[in-house]
């Protein structure tokens, strides 16, 4: 079987420009004090690294792990915590940093988990949003790009753990059956 092909959807410069805008918006929106950035592993790690540097206020960085899609392209619908935060978030302004919102199952679950720890606020920053695919409601305060219902890879996003290190975000196209 031949390899799937990659088509650029969002180029590196476009992504970086948009992240600078998001950082400025976040700086303007929050009251003084540290912002607690919670990166959802693993896909959001590049977005976290660039977004954190686009924010000028003090930030605290932490990571949370959840069960992923495995090697499939569709969600199992079930979410499991595989790594918890290292820091307490009670009274904190928390910004969950995610690569892409698809069904909304992951973020709907995580927002509920974090709310139970009594932070001052919880908001979401997602680089990509596929609104057509939503199954659970999630309010995304900061969206980088709304994209069509295509499977994308690169800039942290994977298919079966591959392609995360592409600098552009690309649509993964399956080879057509002959
Ligand atoms: P949700 O719970 O369905 O919203 O799933 C969100 C997670 O699914 C993201 O954090 C990604 O890991 C993964 N995901 C959803 N769509 C894509 C895609 O197009 N490419 C790669 N991963 C995706
Ligand atoms: Mg993810």
Image (spheres, rainbow, N blue to C red):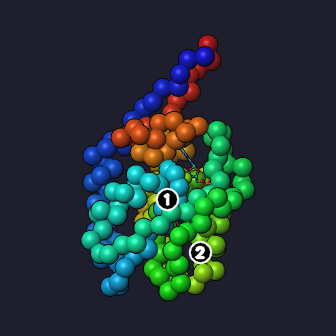
x and y, in percent, of residue 171 in the image: 47, 36
For residue 49, what is the image quadrant? bottom left
- Residue depicted at x 35% and y 83%: 33
Label 2: which residue? 114
Other residues around mark 2 within 10 Å, as few (<14) / some (14–19) / many (≥20): some
x and y, in percent, of residue 149 in the image: 55, 45
Left or right? Give the position of 147 relative to 57: right
- Residue depicted at x 60% and y 61%: 83
* Whether residue 114 is situated above or below residue 13 in the rendered picture: below
- Residue depicted at x 31% and y 44%: 12
Whole-number angstrom distance, CA of label 1 to CA of label 2: 14 Å
x and y, in percent, of residue 126 in the image: 46, 60
- Mark 1, ligand 1, within 8 Å: the answer is yes
Where residue 98 is drawn, which disc sits there?
1
Quarter holding the N terminus? top right
Say whether disc 1 or disc 2 marks the residue closer to the N-terminus.
1
Quick one: SS at disc 2?
Answer: helix
Other residues around mark 1 within 10 Å, as few (<14) / some (14–19) / many (≥20): many
Q: Is residue 141 visible?
A: no
For residue 166, what is the image quadrant? top left
* Whether residue 32 is situated above or below residue 149 in the rendered picture: below
Which numbered mark, 1 or 2, is in the foreground of this view?
A: 2
Quick one: SS at disc 1?
Answer: strand
């Amino acid at each position: 079987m031949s390899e799937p092909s990659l088509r650029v959807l969002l180029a590196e410069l476009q992504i970086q420009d948009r992240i600078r805008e998001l950082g400025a918006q976040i700086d303007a929106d929050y009251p003084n004090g540290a912002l607690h950035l919670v990166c959802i592993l693993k896909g959001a790690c590049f977005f976290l690294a660039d977004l954190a540097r686009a924010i000028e206020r003090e930030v605290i960085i932490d990571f949370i792990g959840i069960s992923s899609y495995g090697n499939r392209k569709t969600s199992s619908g079930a979410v499991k915590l595989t790594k918890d935060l290292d820091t307490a978030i009670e009274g904190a302004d928390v910004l969950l940093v995610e690569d892409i919102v698809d069904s909304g199952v992951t973020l709907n679950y995580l927002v509920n988990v974090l709310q139970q720890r009594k932070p001052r606020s919880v908001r979401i920053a997602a680089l990509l949003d596929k609104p057509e695919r939503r199954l659970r409601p999630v309010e995304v305060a900061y969206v980088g790009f709304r994209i069509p219902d295509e499977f994308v890879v690169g800039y942290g996003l994977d298919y079966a753990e591959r392609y995360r290190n592409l600098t552009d975000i690309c649509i993964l196209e399956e080879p057509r059956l002959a």
